[in-house]
Image (cartoon, grey):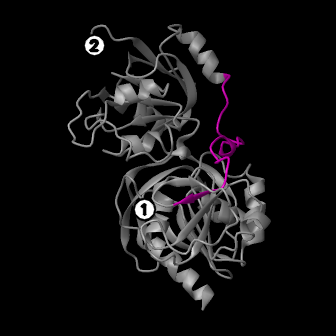
Amino acid sequence: MPRNWLAAKVVLEDGTVFDGYSVGYSGECFGEVVFNTSMTGYQEILTDPSYRGQIVTMTYPQIGNYGVNREDTESSQPQVSGFIVRDACRLESNFRSEGSLQEYLAQHRIVAVAGIDTRALVRRIRTAGAMRGALSTIDSNNELLVEKVRASQGMLGRDLVREVVPQSIQSWEEGLHTLSDPMSSSASVGGNGMPAGYHIVCLDFGMKWNIPRHLFQRGNRVTILPGTSSAQEVLAHQPDGIFLSNGPGDPEPLTYAIETIQQLLGKRPIFGICLGHQLLSLASGAKTFKLKFGHRGANQPVQNLNNMRVEITAQNHGFSVDPETLPDCLEVTHKNLNDDTIAGVRHRQFPAFSVQYHPEASSGPHDSSYLFDQFQTLMAASKA
């Protein structure tokens, strides 16, 4: 441990303990311990609302070497419960840097631990599966920490979406804007002078900011509604298309969202990403299950079954659609090559499709950005 640094612990529910040192806020946190295989993009990972309730371990050893900045965030603040790295670099070797990662974590009260064998931790998770854990700088009693972890809440059956949905209706014009008149449809020109192509309503279950950015950059007007909105509230905005966003946790407890999507199917073209993909599948009659340790990283191979091409994708999810329960109305369009799980579906009857991964990347590869163009084509066909 570096001299004058505060001792910290990583504790898992199976009794495994790692000793390290604090590189963030001094305190204690609980959550599901998972790992991400990305080499870059730690700030986007920290601020992704899909990580709500989770302690993220980075497999790449040196994290923090290009600092942090305001442009690379995916929400207004860090969303992770805690953060684990092998080596938290204090270098800020990037002209865009506005501060150090350690300062950022401390400022936002994120407990973070460095100096542990992250390879051993990841191997433990891969063997035993993602499990509850704790980070602590204030309790050195291993047995007591394990007891507290085992008493903490898990992911199954938990509605984490309500913790991250926006509280108001918003629009996107190269940044979020709260709508003073949310029912207004007078805007015909985007903030960059582009004519608005279509009006897209996004159901926000914990949406990354790069998603509405992609939709807006294609000339669309983007209205963002809380994911708890009803089908009537969505249709009242007279959208040309409906987007279902990513978000955290178990999709099956989100009965309000599933019912809303069931009522929207066939009314407008629908595009879903990650949690939105799971919810579209559930609304169509499928079921989901919890993966052993999930898919998290910017280097996950997916095969497009329409053209058999392989795409390298960004992913972040711990649940998947169960292929044994897939209804006849859904056709599998993509699969994860690491484990053959479903990575995309298309509705056979209605103009609706979804993918389990993140075509907006941020950070990550851009192999799958064509899916946003596919959504544009679907909206155009419905207007013809």
**Which class describes the residues within 10 Å of circle 1: few (<14), some (14-19), or many (20+)?**
some
Measured as percent of width and height from the top left, residue 236 is found at: 75, 69
Tag 1's secondary structure? Answer: loop
Q: Nearer the viewer, residue 281 or 378?
A: 378
Please tell me which residue is depicted at 63% across the width and 18% down the height of the picture: 148
Q: Please, what secondary structure does the residue beneath circle 2 have?
A: loop
Residue named by callout 1 = 337
**Along the line of sight, which residue is nearer the eye, 316 or 92?**
92
Count of numbered circles in the view: 2
Left or right of 89 on screen, residue 293: right
Task: Give the vertical position of 235 relative to 295 (above or below).
Answer: below
Quadrant housing residue 280: bottom right
188 in magenta: no
What is the chief secondary structure element of the magenta stretch? loop
Q: Which residues lie in the magenta part?
A: 151-172
Instruction: Identify the mark at residue 2; answer none if there is no mark.
Output: 2
Which sits earlier in the primary sequence, circle 1 or circle 2?
A: 2
Nearest the viewer among 111 and 200 is 200
Identify the residue at image location x=31%, y=7%.
4
Q: Residue at x 72, y 42 (%)?
A: 157
Numbered tag placed on residue 188 in the rendering:
none
Q: Residues within 10 Å of mark 2 (few under 14, many from 20)?
A: few
